Structures are given as C-alpha cells and as structure tokens.
Image (cartoon, rainbow, N blue to C red):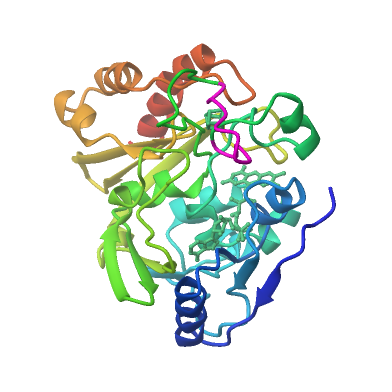
C-alpha cells in the first residue's frame, strides 16, 4: 500500500491549472486532477491506474462558493451539509456521504467525478495480480472484464456517488473548463455509460462549479439511500425525487448506484401519469444492476422500488 511516485502540481488560479494541463497534454504526460483525495488517494495506494502527474485544485481561491444557486467544485461536503444557504435536498445528500471525517476533505467536484467501483477492481495490487487483473486496469495484459466476460469493450463498474441524483432532479448545470475554454451542460447529460470513460470531460478539462435554476427555492424533495453500514458506506442503491411545491406534475426522479452512471428517469415518470407505483415499476424494469458491489443485484433492484416510493411519498 505504498504511494507510487508522482509529481504534484499546485496551481493558484484556474488559468494556471489550465496552462499546466495544456503543457502536460502537449508533452504527452498523463495526469489526474485531485481535490479532497478521499477517492483518488486510496486508488493510488492500491496502484490503480496511477499517473506520473497530479494537479491539485486545493490552492485555487474562489472555487469553493456555497449558495442556493451555485456551488464551487472545491466546496467541502461537510460545509455543504451544514450550510443554511444551500437547497435542503443538496444538504441532505451531502450529509449522507461517507463519514464525518471523510466529508471534511471530500468535495463536490470529487463526488460528481467519482471513479466507478467494482469488487474486482477496488482491491490491492497483489489481489488484482492474483486474478490476472481486469479490463479496467489490465496492466497491458488485455485481461477480460470479470463481470461480463468475453467482451472487452465495456466496463460495467458502478457509479456510487450520492449527490448526483439529487442535483439531477433539481436540474443542475455543470460548468467545465480546460485548455480549450469553458462549456456548460446539464448534469444529467454529463455522465457516459462506461465505467472507464465515466463522463464527457475532455483531456485537460475539470469541473469548475454547478449552478441551479433561479426558482430552486420553490422546489422540494427527498433522497433515500440503501447502504450496508449507516455510519459510512457507499450507496448500494439510491433514489432522489423533487417537485415544485404545490405542483406534483413537475415530479422528477433520479437513481444512483445501479449502473455505471446516475440516471434521471424522465421517460418512466412521464409514462406513469403521476402514479407513484407505476413510476416504481417502470424504473424497476429499466434498471439492471450487475454483481459488483457488496449487496446482490437482485436485492438492490428490488429495493429500488422501495426507495423510489419513499422518496416520492416524502415529497408529497
Ligand atoms: C470509506 C469511504 C466511504 C465513502 N462513502 C461514500 C458515500 O457514502 N457516498 C459517496 O458519494 N462517496 C463516498 N465515498 C467516496 C468519496 O469520499 C466521495 O465521493 C468524495 O466526495 C470524493 O471527493 P474528493 O474531493 O475527495 O475526490 P478526489 O478523491 O479528490 O477525486 C475523485 C475523482 O474525481 C476527480 N476530480 C476531483 N475533482 C475534480 C474536478 N473538480 N473536476 C474533474 N475531476 C475531478 C479526481 O481526478 C478523481 O478521479 C467514500 C469514500 C471512502 C474512502
Ligand atoms: S466491471 Fe469488469 S472491467 Fe469494470 S472494473 Fe469490474 S471487472 Fe473490471
């Protein structure tokens, strides 16, 4: 579990971070961004897809804003959870991430860009070597995916972040920046259904902040999370629901920890004509978790009906 060597870059401004990223890209050097390090550092200690360079966002001033309509990528989850100025659903989701110690370091950007997880992958180097690796970190061997063998085109590792589904139902926009400039997309269009690619970030780009619509205070909602130990575990399944106060017709539902991406279920909600049981059934049908987290996929899939129902009923 020794940390591999890497060169750490500590830019003081967003512009400097983009310039360092551009230089590394031009010289063909691979790198990772690091924020709180609560996900990246354990992966590095296990020698999982390490890079020779790491760019830290911790020294950049002004990217940890917390307000009702804007949250910076370096906002710590403990500050979001305890803030009176964020939407209650976002505070609730942040308070359910990991443990209080981890939340003090963990950031919003790191949570939304969290690496996908799989019990064939989140293991020590020795353990992974003993099973001859897997497709996501094959050490040049061309190893197979252990969950869905005989296809080395897709990794189905699971996205297990808590905050994304909550921001999705509140219609959050993510703002990205990199050497080629800035761009913004809706959070529910940010993720890509591949456990290795994970999202639409281009080489050198990072997530600067998220923004929420101006009328966000008029919305209410609820988040329900299934986990093994309440004290700190990742979600094994999670459902968020939100709707505009007094208007159930605006109900939105999103889930997490069931596949490689968190997903908003607009089609399932639209097809159910406001009937919560029909929404649960439709989401159950469209979701197929695989066997790569602590709890069996059939149980997680069955539980999603319960979580969606509770999240929707809570917000009545
Ligand atoms: C024991 C334990 C329990 C946990 N439980 C939970 C849980 O219940 N729920 C949950 O959601 N998470 C959980 N986590 C995962 C993690 O702690 C959190 O998701 C945390 O918010 C990650 O943020 P970070 O700043 O530490 O990310 P980092 O470790 O710094 O980064 C995570 C990933 O995001 C990338 N990244 C970071 N910031 C940016 C950015 N601004 N732009 C682009 N890429 C970026 C990094 O390159 C890295 O790939 C747990 C972790 C541990 C160790
Ligand atoms: S889903 Fe397959 S390729 Fe992805 S981490 Fe798990 S075993 Fe490896």
Q: Is residue 143 above or below residue 116?
A: above
Q: Is residue 181 magenta?
A: no
> Residue at horizontal 45%, vertical 20%?
306
In the rendered image, residue 217, in percent from the top left (x then y), is placed at 33, 61
> Magenta residues?
136-146
User: Front-most of 264 and 16?
Assistant: 16
* 268 sits to left or right of 151: left
In the rendered image, residue 52, in percent from the top left (x then y), is placed at 65, 64
Residue placed farthest to the right in the image? Answer: 2
> Residue at horizontal 47%, vertical 32%?
155
Q: Quadrant of residue 247?
A: top left
In the rendered image, residue 310, in percent from the top left (x then y), is placed at 43, 28
* 253 sits to left or right of 269: right
In the rendered image, residue 220, in percent from the top left (x then y), is placed at 35, 49
Q: Is residue 286 above or below residue 123?
A: above
Q: In the rendered picture of this protein, how many numbered marks are placed on residues?
A: 0
> Residue at horizontal 75%, vertical 45%?
46
Q: Which quadrant is home to the C terminus?
A: top left
User: Front-most of 38 and 163?
Assistant: 38
Query: Secondary structure of the magenta portion, mostly?
Result: loop
Q: Is residue 165 above or below residue 24?
A: above
* 80 sits to left or right of 18: right
* 140 sits to left or right of 159: right
User: Front-most of 178 and 151?
Assistant: 151
Q: Quadrant of ligand 2?
A: top right
Q: Is residue 267 above or below residue 24?
A: above
């Amino acid at each position: 579990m020794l940390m591999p060597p890497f060169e750490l870059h500590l830019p003081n401004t967003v512009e400097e971070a983009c310039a360092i990223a551009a230089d590394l890209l031009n010289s063909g050097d691979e790198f990772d961004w690091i924020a709180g390090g609560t996900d990246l550092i354990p992966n590095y200690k296990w020698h999982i897809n390490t890079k020779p360079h790491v760019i830290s966002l911790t020294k950049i001033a002004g990217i940890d804003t917390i307000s009702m309509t804007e949250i910076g990528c370096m906002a710590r989850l403990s500050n979001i959870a305890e803030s009176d100025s964020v939407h209650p659903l976002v505070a609730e989701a942040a308070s359910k991430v990991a443990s209080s110690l981890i939340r003090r370091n963990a950031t919003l950007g790191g949570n939304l860009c969290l690496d996908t997880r799989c019990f064939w992958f989140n293991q020590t180097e020795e353990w992974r070597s003993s099973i001859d690796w897997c497709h996501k970190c094959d050490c040049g061997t061309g190893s197979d995916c252990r969950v869905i063998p005989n296809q080395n085109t897709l990794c189905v590792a699971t996205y297990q972040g808590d905050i994304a589904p909550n921001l999705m139902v509140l219609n959050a926009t993510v703002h990205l920046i990199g050497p080629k400039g800035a761009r913004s997309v809706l959070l529910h269009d940010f993720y890509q259904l591949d456990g290795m690619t994970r999202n639409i970030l281009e080489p050198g780009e990072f997530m600067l902040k998220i923004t929420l619509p101006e009328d966000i205070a008029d919305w209410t909602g609820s988040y329900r999370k299934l986990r093994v130990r309440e004290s700190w575990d990742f979600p094994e399944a999670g459902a968020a629901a939100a709707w505009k106060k007094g208007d159930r017709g605006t109900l939105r539902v999103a889930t997490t920890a069931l596949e490689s991406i968190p997903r908003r279920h607009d089609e399932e909600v639209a097809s159910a004509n406001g009937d919560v049981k029909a929404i649960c059934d439709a989401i159950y049908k469209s979701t197929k978790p695989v066997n790569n987290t602590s709890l069996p996929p059939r149980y997680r899939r069955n539980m999603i009906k319960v979580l969606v129902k509770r999240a929707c009923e809570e917000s009545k």
